[in-house]
Image (cartoon, rainbow, N blue to C red):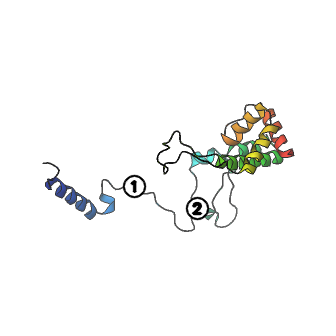
Amino acid sequence: MGKGDKKHKRRRQQARQQLRAQPPGKRKDAPQRATQPRTGQAVRPTPERMARGKWTQPQGMGKDNIAVTDMAADMVARLFLDGSITKGQEQAARTWQEIRARYEAELPDIAGYKSCIDGSVPGFDDGDGDPQVIEEYRAMERRLSLPQRRAILCVCWQDAPPPSMDVLRGALDVISNA
C-alpha cells in the first residue's frame, strides 16, 4: 500500500489503455474541439457580436468566402466613425498609440524585488533603454496639459470613453500639429 505498491500503478495504466481504445467521440474526458472551417470559408462573427460593431459588407459573387472586418474595433475608431473626431485627429491618436507602445517596450521589466546573490534571476535592468524613444514620448507628453494627457490615456490606451470630447480634440490637435 506504500510507495512501492504496483497494484495502483497497474490499475491506472489499464484505465489509460481502455480510454485510448475508445473512439474519440465516446471518451468522457476528451476535450471538445471546435470544428475548423474548410479551406476558403470565412468565419463569421456571431449575431450578438455583429450588433456591437460597424462591419464591412462584402459585395459580389462568393461573398460568403470573404471575411468581414470590424471597423469600430477600438474607441478611436468608434469616435471617428461617429464623426466625433476628424481623420487628422484619428491619425494623431494612432501616432500617439505607436509612440506610447514603443515607450512602454523600453521600460525595464522588473517584477519586484529579486535576489542579488543569484545572477540568473531577472529583476535588474542596467540599461536605460533607447533614449531617443523615451525623449520622443516625453516631448509629446510635455506639450499636453494634464487633462489632455488624461483624455488621451483614456481613449487611446485604456479604450474607454473620453472624460471630455473638447479636451480630447484639443489634445489630438496638439499631437497632429507637432
Q: Residue at x 72, y 44 (%)?
A: 76
* Amino acid at dot 2: Ala
Between 4 and 120, the residue placed more toward the observer is: 120
Q: Which residue is mark 1?
A: 32
SS label for mark 2: loop
Mark 1 and mark 2 in contact (Cβ < 8 Å)? no
Earlier sequence position, callout 2 versus callout 1: 1
Q: Residue at x 82, y 38 (%)?
A: 143
Between 5 and 93, the residue placed more toward the observer is: 5
Q: Quadrant of the C terminus?
A: top right
Task: Indicate the position of residue 166 as horizontal and vertical percent values.
Answer: 81, 33
Task: Indicate the position of residue 120 as horizontal and vertical percent values.
Answer: 48, 51
Residue 64 to residue 167: above or below: below
* Amino acid at dot 1: Gln
Q: Residue at x 76, y 49 (%)?
A: 95
Mark 2 neighbour density, 10 Å: few (under 14) some (14–19) many (20 or more): some
